Image: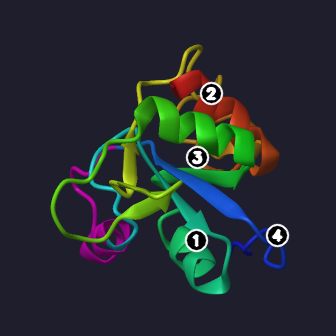
Amino acid sequence: MAKAQNKHAKGKVAVVLIRGMVKVVKPVKETLAMLNLHRKNHCVVIDNNPAYNGMLIRVKDYITWGEIDDATFAELVQKRGQLLEGRGKALEVNGKKYKRYFALAPPRKGFGRKGIKTAFKVGGGLGYRGEKMNDLVKRML
C-alpha cells in the first residue's frame, strides 16, 4: 500500500484530475466528489493534512498531486479563478469568493512520456509529484 508523502509538511496541495470518470467504481467516484473533482483537467487546492492524504491515496490512479507555492497559487487564482455568485462553499482569497475548483487546459508537452496510465515515479502522469506540481500547473494555465 502506498504511503502518504510529506505528511508533516504544512501548506497547500494542488490536486488535478487526469483521467476521465467513465467506468470508475463507486467509492472512488464518491471520494473524487468530496474533493470537488468532477471533470478531467480540473484542479483543487487543499490543505496538507492526514484526512486529505488518505483520500488522495484512495484515488491515486486517477489524479496527480503535489505541494504548490504561494506564487503559483496566486497566478492560478488570477488566471483561472471564477467568482462565486450567490451562496455556497467558496475559496476566499483577498476578500473575494471564488469557486473551489479551477478549470485548466491540458498541459503543454503532456503529462509525462509514458502517458496518463502510469505513475509519475516511472515517467507517467499519475500520483505524487512533490514540488514539480508547480511546473505542471504553470503548463496548464
Residue 10: horizontal and vertical position, in percent? 79, 72
Magenta range: 20-33
139 or 96, which is in the foreground? Answer: 96
Q: Amino acid at mark 3?
A: Leu
**Disc 2 and disc 3: Cα gap in Å?**
17 Å
Q: Is residue 21 left or right of residue 58?
A: left
Neighbours of disc 1 within 10 Å: few (<14), some (14-19), many (20+): some
Q: Earlier in the sequence, mark 4 or mark 3?
A: 4
Determine whether the residue tagged by mark 1 lies in a helix, strand or loop.
helix
Task: Tell me whether circle 2 and circle 3 mark residues in contact (CB < 8 Å).
Answer: no
Whether residue 92 is situated above or below residue 137 in the rendered picture: below
Identify residue for label 2.
138
Q: Is residue 32 inside the magenta stretch?
A: yes
Instruction: Provide the secondary structure element on which disc 2 rests.
Output: helix
Q: Residue 131's mark?
A: none
- Residue 63, given in percent of the width and then of the height, sits at 50, 52
Residue in view at x 82 percent, y 69 percent:
6
> Residue 55: image x %, image y %?
51, 76
Q: Residue at x 58, y 29 (%)?
A: 111
Secondary structure of the residue carrying numbered label 4:
loop
Q: Amino acid at mark 4?
A: Asn
Q: Which residue is mark 3?
A: 126
How many other residues sit within 10 Å of disc 4, few (<14), some (14-19) or many (≥20)? few
* SS at mark 3 in the image: loop
Residue that badge 1 annotates: 57
Comes first in the chain, label 1 or label 2: 1
Residue receiving disc 4:
6
Residue under the image location 37 percent in, 73 percent down? 31
